[in-house]
Image: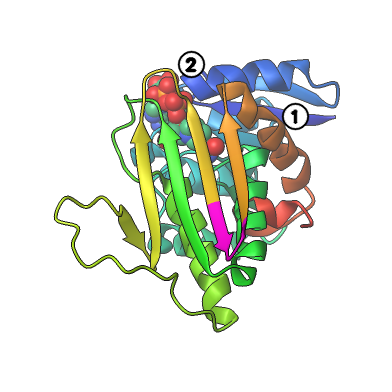
Amino acid sequence: MITVAVLGAAGRMGTHVVNAVGAAPDLELVAALDHSDDVAQAARAGAQVAVDFTVPTATEANVHALIDLGINAVVGTTGWTEESLLRVEEHLRERPELGVLIAPNFALSAVLSMRFAAAAARYFESVEVVELHHPDKVDAPSGTAVHTARGIAAARAAAGIAASPDATTHDPDGARGAVIDGVHVHAVRLRGLVAHEEVLLGNPGEQLTIRTDSFDRVSFMPGVLLGVREVVRRPGLAVGLDSYMDL
Ligand SMILES: NC(=O)c1ccc[n+]([C@@H]2O[C@H](COP(=O)([O-])OP(=O)(O)OC[C@H]3O[C@@H](n4cnc5c(N)ncnc54)[C@H](O)[C@@H]3O)[C@@H](O)[C@H]2O)c1
């Protein structure tokens, strides 16, 4: 039995995590904390793992507090930078038995899609990314699309593949989309959608489409539970759920 605390338990994601942990036979929810609670309550309740879905301004301080308390952390909150990740990595050296997983996307379909796209990228002449989201999303392109494009670009660079062919010389309105590390990324905002992404890979006479669809926040829960089960036996900092997935 792994004992679990949830930070941000009253939030949209936190509510789902509380339910998912409560329903898992091998996990026990021992603390459900939100912004007015002291993180130390997680230790007093005997939590081995804390799941953080709070806010970007709070998450780093939470993780450092958890490390001091001797609690492993699974973090879905956004806003992490190279510098803040480095600070966690350094702090963990004082507690080499602890694990921290920071994952910008817990949807297994999205994580796999990014990995499949990077694996396929060098076999195709052309590649573009289309991300499609609900119209209440404030940032574009999505963090996942940026991550996808970077993974594709790195795989193509490592294999010595030239840029995707494109004869466009006139595009005053930006119809060719954003360009992330040389990969074109297009953002669609449409009522009725949740979170979706397509990677289009083209060669003469053939196309591969890799598509991922998140229809509901429950789509993140299998990944969160995987993180909780693995973090207790993987000391150190892991960034991205794929590092736990033996892909
Ligand atoms: N990694 C992923 O797969 C994934 C998926 C969805 C959302 N997110 C991210 O997760 C975060 C939470 O998203 P949400 O939609 O649940 O937000 P939300 O606003 O619904 O919930 C955040 C909760 O955190 C609480 N909170 C704020 N400060 C706190 C603190 N110091 N300690 C404890 N609780 C605190 C708030 O009161 C609120 O209940 C965001 O950063 C979001 O971008 C990540």
The amino acid at mark 2 is Ala
**Residue at image location 71% in from the left, 22% down from the top:** 21
The amino acid at mark 1 is Thr
Residue 63 visible in the snapshot: yes
**Label 2 CB less than 8 angstroms from ligand 1:** yes
| Residue that carries the numbered disc 1 in the rendered image | 3
* Location of residue 163 in the rendering, given as x and y in whole percent from the top left corner: 43, 74
Residue 10 versus residue 233 in the image, above or below: above
Callout 2: few (<14), some (14-19), or many (20+) C-alpha neighbours within 10 Å? some
User: In this orientation, which residue lies closer to the viewer: 108 or 162?
Assistant: 162
Residue 20 versus residue 239 in the image, above or below: above
* Location of residue 62 in the rendering, given as x and y in whole percent from the top left corner: 47, 40
Numbered mark located on residue 10 in the image:
2
- Queried whether the magenta region covers residue 105, the answer comes back as no
Residue 229 versus residue 68 in the image, above or below: above
User: In this orientation, which residue lies closer to the viewer: 122 or 233?
Assistant: 122
Q: Secondary structure at mark 2?
A: loop
User: In this orientation, which residue lies closer to the viewer: 192 or 4?
Assistant: 192
Report the side of 33 relative to 132 (left or right).
Answer: right
* Mark before the other along the chain sequence, 2 or 1: 1
Quadrant into which the C terminus falls: bottom right
Quarter holding ligand 1: top left
Numbered mark located on residue 136 in the image:
none
Q: Secondary structure at mark 1?
A: strand
**Residue at image location 37% in from the left, 47% down from the top:** 186
- Queried whether the magenta region covers residue 202, the answer comes back as yes
* Location of residue 213 in the rendering, given as x and y in whole percent from the top left corner: 58, 32
Report the side of 223 relative to 125 (left or right).
Answer: right
Q: Which residues are magenta?
A: 200-206
Q: Nearer the viewer, mark 2 or mark 1?
A: 2
